[in-house]
Structure formats: C-alpha cells, structure tokens
Amino acid sequence: MRFIADFHIHSKYSRATSPQMEVKTLSEVAKLKGISLLGTGDFTHHLWLEELKNVLKDSGNGFFEYNGVNFILTGEISSIYSKGGRVRKIHNVIFAPSFDIVDKINAALSGYGNLSSDGRPIIGIDAKDLAEILFGISKYIFLVPGHIWTPWFSLFGSKSGFDSIEECFEEYAKDIYALETGLSSDPGMNWRWSKLDRFNLISNSDSHSPQKIGREANVFDVEMSYKGVIDALKVKDNSKFLHTIEFFPEEGKYHYDGHRNCNVRSDPKETKKNKNICPVCKKPLTVGVMSRVDDLADRPEGYVPEKSVPYKRMIPLSEIISDVLGVGDSSKAVEKEYSAIIPRVGTELEVLTEVREDELLKKLPQKIAKAIINVRSGNVNILPGFDGEYGKIEILKKDEAAGEKQMSLF
C-alpha cells in the first residue's frame, strides 16, 4: 500500500508550540496534506500520553487511528551530557509499537530527568546509554538520530556533535538503521559522505504547528503496520521506501554559516577564508549544515550511491501562494486560496508533487500553477538560512510575476 508518513512532530506540550497541536486538528490537517501516517510526538509527556490513550483507537498492528488517520507512537529526547572532554547535545527520535512499551520507556527514563518539564524533555543521559536502555526494554523499539546536522543539538552538529556514529553510540551503532536529515540538509548532501551509505535517510517536518506538518515526509509502499514500516527502514529497498519529500535545504535555518545578530550570512568558502570568525563582532560564527557536511564529505557534490532512496524537493503550498500574492503565509488571502485549491485538485502533497503540469495549468490560477512548476524544476531563488534564520524564497521571477492580476479561485 502506498502512503505518506511524517514521523517527527511535537504536541501542544512542547516549548514554542501551537496550542492547536492536538489530535483532532492534526488529523484534519493530515487529510488536507495527504498524510496517512503521523507520528504522535512527545509520548514522554504524561498529559499528552493520557490524551493519546483516551482518543486513539488501537488498530492492532502497532498503529493507532483517529478520524481516518493513522498514528505511530513517537517521542524525541534531548540528551545533554559530557563525553570525550566536550558537552554533547544530541536529539533522538524514538518509535514504539504499543502504549505498554511507552509506559516502560517513560518509567526507565524518568530517573534521568523531569519528563513532564517539556514535550521534548532534556535528560542527562549518554546517547549510547539511551540506546542500551531502549533496546533492553524491547527489540521492537526503533531509534533514529534527529536532524543530524543541526549545529547545536544533533549527532553531527558543529557545536556539540560527533564525527562518526560509532563515536556516539559505540557498540549500539549497529542497531541504528536510519538517520533524519533535517530541514537544512537533503539526501543529496548526505550522499557525499560514504559512511552514511548503509543508513536509510528519512525526512520529517519536526512541526510545531499544524500547518507545518508534511513540509518534509516519507513515501512508502509497504503493509500499513508498525512492522511494515520499521522493516522498510531497516533495509535499503527503494521499491518499498519510495522517496522522501524535501524542503529546499537552503530554506532551512541552519544551512549557511553566520551570525544572526550581526546580520552576517557566510557560505563555506567565505567562512574558511575568514577562519570561522565573524567579520563584524570578531567572535566565532555559528557553523551551519553545508560547512559541516563539507568537512566530513569524501565525495563530490552530485554523487548518487547505489540503491539510494530518491527524493523530491518542494515548498509548502501556503508559502507558494504567499509568494505569488505578496502577503504573509498565514494571511486570510492565502488561507482562502489554499481552501479553494485542495478540494478541486487533490491533497496538498499531490498538488505539489504528483498532479500533471497540464492539469495544474488548467485547474489553478496561472501564476500559482507556474510557481508550483518552478518549484518542481528547482527554478527558484533562495537566500540561504543561517544561525536560526529561515531562508527567504523567491519563486516567481519578476517577469513571471508581472502581467495579469492574480485571480482568486472564488
């Protein structure tokens, strides 16, 4: 069965997260997006876990259902600890097949930190020890290092990460089968490092608001079950794990190096030339994902490993409409246009990645259709994100944006 999954989101109990991140709203938005399987996020938080237990129906296959949308039990742990003479800050996403196993995970981890402090709790535990505890609870638990290149909190982050998976997880490195690329990198960037060849590269939204779910996602053709998905993630087979849907990594907020306070954005060559020092304040720059990949890569840009799972780049539909209309992506004008497109043409992810170009041109306002086609072909301008600042997008060129006034579907 072919379906789209977004495994990594957060609930309303996580810091800086929308109060709308609750099951009812998530299921409604997932349907609009075309997502059939959504991670619950935050199962370590007692209040969120109680809500999940009350509203989700056990499907008997490791998934849980609400309003026609399947959920998989997931949570993210922030580990902060000292190793190798450095402070490490590593985020890991945990998958579990049942509430019974989640209860055991929470009981085991509660001794290392306050799980109720945040939906994504900070605990003082080595990532290797975390793996040991989880795999000791159940062989069906699945552990994925989260957004592996983010500077401050990740496996390979420039500020607090490691230079290899073995250095981080030691003897449990063999039990890690998949890595989350994060918004500021895509599979193509990861393919430059041969040490990552054995891993499946997954992409998720890490969403803090309903509108952002599905901005990155995974497309499968497997049995709709926990076992079906986990088995597909343990073996590299692009007939089962079909492709990922990706942000343009330049749009991610840590793609380039820089200093947000100094308004300094720096590409890797410029950073090396300046010896990682900010030209304004003379302090070290925040080294972003592109530079960090560059440091560890042993292959040129454009290299594609054998049996790799392909990917499609896209920009969320609300951002495309926003660019075309010249208004904010949360404005009523964007919402009106979005609400008109979805019932006429298909789910959001179908519109962005599947619907034929001639159909788009026939069914959508011309400038929105052209903007979607530009995104599919990569014909966009993006000022890369840096030091926590998202990249800025220009989808329609000036000559395309000129001409007839954009007509609403209403």
Image: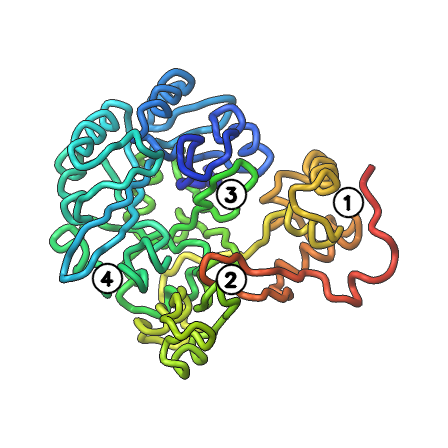
Q: Mark 4 points at which residue?
A: 162
Q: Give how far across and how far down residue 385 sits, in percent.
A: 51, 62
Q: Classify 10 Å Cα crowding around label 1: few (below 14), some (14-19), many (20 and above).
A: some
Q: Classify 10 Å Cα crowding around label 2: few (below 14), some (14-19), many (20 and above).
A: many
The answer to whether residue 251 shows anywhere in this view is yes
For the point 68% across and 37% down, which residue is it?
342
Q: Which of marks 1 and 2 is nearer the N terminus?
A: 1
Q: Earlier in the sequence, mark 2 or mark 3?
A: 3
The image shows residue 27, relative to residue 241, as above or below, that is above
The answer to whether residue 302 shows anywhere in this view is no
Residue 161 or residue 31, whichever sits in front: 161
Most distant residue in the front direction: 281
Q: Give how far across and how far down residue 64 sits, in percent.
A: 39, 25
Residue 151 as seen in the image, left or right of residue 103: right
- Residue 363 is labelled as 1
The image shows residue 278, relative to residue 82, as above or below, that is below
Callout 1 amino acid: Lys
Q: Name the residue under label 3.
A: 214
1 vs 4, front mark: 4
Q: Classify 10 Å Cα crowding around label 3: few (below 14), some (14-19), many (20 and above).
A: many
